[in-house]
């Protein structure tokens, strides 16, 4: 058995029930994706539009593609026809563009709101207050071609497991707040996407429903 198949079995086998695996295949070749596919994996994550569109056109149609990176609004129309979930929505502008392009395709596209909780500097993600503001504003309720399915976040890239756990629990508690304030009657709001190669076991203890694992399955990326 190849390394990819072995790794996939190991990672998938270590997830508790209720946690789904998004195999992050960015920068890895189509043959690597096919190895994971043949092992039964169907959900893959990519973060660059052109790379994703090329792979999606060439690989089996029953793959569910998740867009996990920062998405520029001018790229939405290229992935709207086929994307299963856009995980990192961090502005009303992007949400509206996804809605518009989904409408053009006659689809409803599932999205997650990306939170910025980590102490690290990054340009992306909503602070808790920005996220509350976006939802309080209410305009999202008019967007009938997007379905907000939950939250996504990346914990700080640190060795301190307690810090990682703390950040993930902030996200988990915030999920509960949003659920009761805005989505109490919406069973589709149920996803908590956190956990990567170095911290997915912690994420599983912090109420993740979706881990995004690349390196531990496919090996180091060659950029
Ligand atoms: C690349 C990436 C991952 C996977 O990271 P690994 O450390 O390779 O598991 C997960 N989430 C996001 C948003 C990414 O960009």
Image: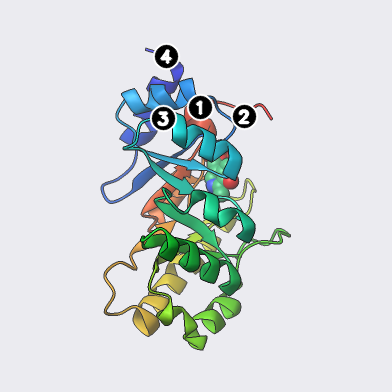
Tell me residue 194's x, y (percent).
47, 53
Q: Earlier in the sequence, mark 3 or mark 4?
A: 4
Q: Element under label 3?
A: loop
How much space separates mark 3 and mark 4, taking CA atoms? 20 Å
Tell me residue 58's x, y (percent).
45, 29
Marks 3, 2: nearer the viewer: 3
- Residue 59, label in figure: 3
- Residue 21 position by quadrant: top left
* Residue with the most extreme top position: 1
- Residue 221, label in figure: 2
Q: Earlier in the sequence, mark 4 or mark 1?
A: 4
- Residue 2, label in figure: 4
The CB of the residue at mark 1 lies under 8 Å from ligand 1: yes
Q: How many marks?
A: 4
Q: Earlier in the sequence, mark 4 or mark 2?
A: 4
Question: Is 66 left, or right, of 47 in this rendering?
Answer: left
Q: Which residue is mark 1?
A: 218
Q: Nearer the viewer, residue 167 or 24?
A: 24
Q: Nearer the viewer, residue 164 or 60?
A: 60
Q: Nearer the viewer, residue 27 or 126?
A: 27
């Amino acid at each position: 058995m190849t390394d990819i198949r072995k790794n996939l079995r190991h990672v998938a086998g270590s997830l508790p029930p209720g946690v789904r695996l998004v195999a992050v295949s960015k920068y890895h070749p189509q043959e690597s994706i096919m190895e994971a596919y043949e092992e039964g994996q169907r959900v893959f994550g990519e973060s660059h539009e052109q790379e994703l569109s090329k792979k999606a056109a060439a690989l089996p149609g029953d793959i569910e593609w998740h867009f996990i990176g920062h998405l520029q609004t001018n790229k939405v129309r290229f992935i709207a026809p086929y994307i299963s979930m856009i995980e990192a929505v961090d502005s009303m502008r992007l949400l509206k563009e996804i809605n518009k392009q989904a409408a053009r395709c006659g689809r409803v596209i599932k999205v997650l709101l990306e939170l910025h909780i980590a102490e690290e500097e990054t340009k992306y993600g909503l602070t808790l207050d920005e996220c509350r503001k976006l939802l309080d504003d209410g305009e999202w309720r008019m967007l009938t071609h997007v379905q907000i399915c939950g939250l996504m976040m990346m914990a700080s890239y640190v060795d301190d497991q307690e810090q990682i756990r703390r950040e993930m629990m902030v996200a988990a508690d915030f999920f509960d707040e949003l659920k009761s304030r805005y989505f109490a009657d919406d069973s589709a709001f149920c996803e908590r996407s956190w956990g990567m190669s170095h911290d997915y076991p912690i994420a599983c203890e912090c109420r993740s429903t979706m881990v995004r694992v690349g390196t531990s399955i496919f090996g180091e990326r060659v950029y």
